[in-house]
Image (tube, rainbow, N blue to C red):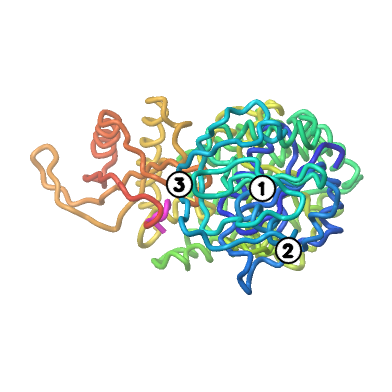
Amino acid sequence: MDTSSIVILDFGSQYTQLIARRIREQNVFSVVLPCTAKLKEIASYKPLGIILSGGPSSVYDSDAPPADPGVLQLGKPVLGICYGLQFITHHLGGKVRSAEKREYGHAQVSVVDAATPLFSGLPASLQVWMSHGDEALDLPPGFHLTAKTSNAVAGIANPEKKIWAVQFHPEVHHTPLGTELLRNFLFNICNAKPDWTPEHFIQSTVSAIRDKVGDDHAICALSGGVDSSVAAVLVHRAIGDRLTCVFVDNGVLRKNEFFKVQENLRGKLGLNLVAVDASGRFLSKLAGITDPETKRKIIGNEFIAVFDDEAHRIAQQTGGVDWLVQGTLYPDVIESSSVKGPSQTIKSHHNVGGLPETMKLKLIEPLRDLFKDEVRRIGRDLGMPDDILQRQPFPGPGLAVRILGEITPERVALLQEADDIVVTEIKAAGLYQQIWQSFAVLLPVKSVGVMGDQRTYAYTCAIRAVHSEDGMTADWVPLPYDVLKKISSRIVNEIRGINRVVYDITSKPPGTIEWE
């Protein structure tokens, strides 16, 4: 790593990824490690500073996160946040106790040491977001109070040891001046440089891929989405046509998507693309299947089989394939079972699982250090079209998880038309890029209707639109009535087979974004 870096140790906070994002927004590279990381691993990133995240534990619990207190002796500037403050206090000779008055939510903090560089340029009173049940009672030797609330210690510092800590969360939007505080830590205390830029990333990544791959050949499974497309363009820039991209029609793509993706990736971006129409193969396997998880497994397994067939065919043509390109993102890495700290494992490293062992390909994951918004910025600097970069997330099993019940060619065709109307009208209303996901769902429910004085008995279509930052939680979008009216009118008038439209107003939790 030849840029400035900040190491964030994860003690289980729900905001750990947000800390990393806030650092990245200042064009400073950040990496999240479990709090159990060895000192040697932490030092390997040559950090300019270390941030200790919050977390749900108490430092005096028997199962408190087993971090090495030696991290406080590395001589690097340290910023403790929430639990991080309590960890510092506890391990350096102070005392932490269960607070008599717990603080959750908005709070006012008074800065009592305006000279501390962490609060440089900030007002004497700050609105912040608190989330703690413990508090620092006695400060460690050499530390002094820098900020307080009416109830508790809110900030401490020991400049000689290069350690600062705050009890509140500067990374959340509910702390309006939190970004300024983090900037003070980065630039006033750590002397970081804002050199984590798209241009720098592209140049260094292309060079690293070129050196790693040499004269070998690589393949990439393309979905047409943001992540795999940007990864493919980066690798193509490094090794040219020695990268072969494979795009598979699994029979449950959106309307005309098989042709649109080819036009974008082969026509506009010049990628060496192999398009495989395996729709019949997938649909025959899905015939008669109604269980959602079984559908997913069938589609996943069949994709692996198709991709394996193509990989062997490409290897015969090129003399061998050595590398597999994947669009793995940083949240995949943080949430995977390979990065274990006190945070709950949310999902396994989904891009790697299930590949045939016979392929024995080495991985190229050029985006594994990036968040989704950073991937889009990289894509723009690569000159990629907005209709790829601004595409809403689309599930791997495609429309299969939006067709409840059996998957048939007729039902796929119905949903493709309905989904196309939803997306078209939301784009026409200028709302597409403001919404995380918006789509149609075909329900296995038929109801009586009337059209042109004739009785109909047809399917019901549900419309789903949600706001989200990462897909982990979501709120339903109150689409304007005129947009809903236009969507409903077009679907029932233009699609023979659907005569009723409903709108899903369930948030996540308790519902999921997809229906299956």
Q: Is residue 514 magenta?
A: yes
Mark 1: amino acid: Leu
Residue type of the residue flagged with mark 3:
Gly
Q: Nearer the viewer, residue 371 or 156?
A: 156
What kind of element bears circle 3?
Answer: strand
Q: Earlier in the sequence, mark 2 or mark 3?
A: 2
Q: Is residue 403 visible?
A: yes
Span highlighted in magenta in the image: 511-516
Q: Please, what is the dominant secondary structure of the magenta stretch?
A: loop
Disc 2 to disc 3, how far (Cα)? Answer: 27 Å
Q: Nearer the viewer, mark 1 or mark 3?
A: 3
Disc 2 marks which residue?
Answer: 67
Q: In x, y percent, where is residue 225? A: 58, 41
Horizontal arrangement in the rendering, residue 476 relative to residue 131 (left or right)? left
- Residue 483, image quadrant: top left
Residue pictured at 29% horizontal, 58% vertical: 444
Secondary element at image label 2: loop
Residue drawn at x 70%, y 45% as measured from the top left: 144
Find disc 1 in the rendering and name its residue. 329
For marks 1 and 2, give the CA distance. Answer: 26 Å
421 within the magenta span: no
Q: Residue at x 22, y 45 (%)?
A: 500
Disc 1 versus disc 3: distance between alpha carbons?
Answer: 31 Å
Q: Which residue is mark 3?
A: 105
Tell me where residue 97 appears, x and y as whole percent: 57, 63
Looking at the rendered image, the quarter that the N terminus falls into is top right
Sequence-first tag of 1 and 3: 3
